Amino acid sequence: MTLKQFTFNPFGVNGFVLGNDSGDAILIDPSASNEREEAALSDYLEKSGLSVKRLLNTHLHLDHVLGNAFAARTYGVAPEAHEEDAFLLDLQEEQSQMFGLPLREPSPALGNYLAEGDTVEIPGIRLQVIHVAGHSPGGLAFYCEKPGTVNGQEDVPPLLFAGDILFAGSRGRSDLFGGDEEALVSGIKSKLLTLPGETVVFPGHGPMTTIASEKRWY
Ligand SMILES: [Zn+2]
Ligand SMILES: [Zn+2]
């Protein structure tokens, strides 16, 4: 598979494009907030010969859904996320005011709900859906247990796209809409820190880390 990370919008959200050998792609939080960022995403997809099949959101805070309208319109896909975060799409204007993030075009409604234990699959790429509430009620992490060859590198360890649940050296805040510190910590401990230590974690903001290096904080 191929893996490309983009860091978009004033909040520095990490978005990802996962591509397979047949030219299918999964987008995770492609939160482009202006024409330059939209062009960076669409140019990459075009040059790589990738066609978008799925649009996943780790959660529905505004900074993570800013590119949903563009991606949905351009690639004919609907966003997918956890049902318990769906209320946040009704609060995009409020979030825009609160975070000081301009809202150019609201995200369309979810086309599919993802829940704990679901898998999102395109040929050659299989993501397991892990639900950890606490940063937002419907926070999701996507776990790729066997990525195989990634960007030409063989035998890559498992990958975890952690959204704002887990960051390098910290975790997401729990004082926003529906946040819950206790649920967040217990979800991280029981569902994320139990993954193999070599798992490479791609958080929704900031640098990569591994499960082994985050374990020491808990
Ligand atoms: Zn968030
Ligand atoms: Zn965020």
Image (tube, grey):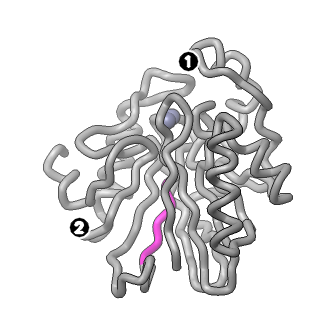
Residue 36: x %, y % from top left: 65, 41
Residue drawn at the location 19% of the way across and 45% of the way down: 218
Which residues are the magenta region? Answer: 141-145
Pick the residue in front: 98 or 37.
37
Nearer the observer: mark 1 or 2; the answer is 1
As drawn, the label of residue 85 is none
Q: Pointer 1: what residue?
A: 99
Q: Quadrant of residue 45?
A: bottom right
Q: Is ligand 2 within 8 Å of the beta carbon of the residue shown at mark 2?
A: no
| Sequence-wise first label, 1 or 2 | 1
Q: Secondary structure at mark 2?
A: loop
Q: CA distance from mark 1 to mark 2?
A: 34 Å
Residue 144 within the magenta-colored segment of the rendering: yes
Residue 159 horizontal/vertical position (percent): 40, 68
Residue in the image at 18% along x and 55% along y: 213
Q: Is residue 186 above or below residue 182?
A: below
- Specify the quadrant of the image occupied by residue 156: bottom left
The amino acid type of the residue labelled 2 equals Gly
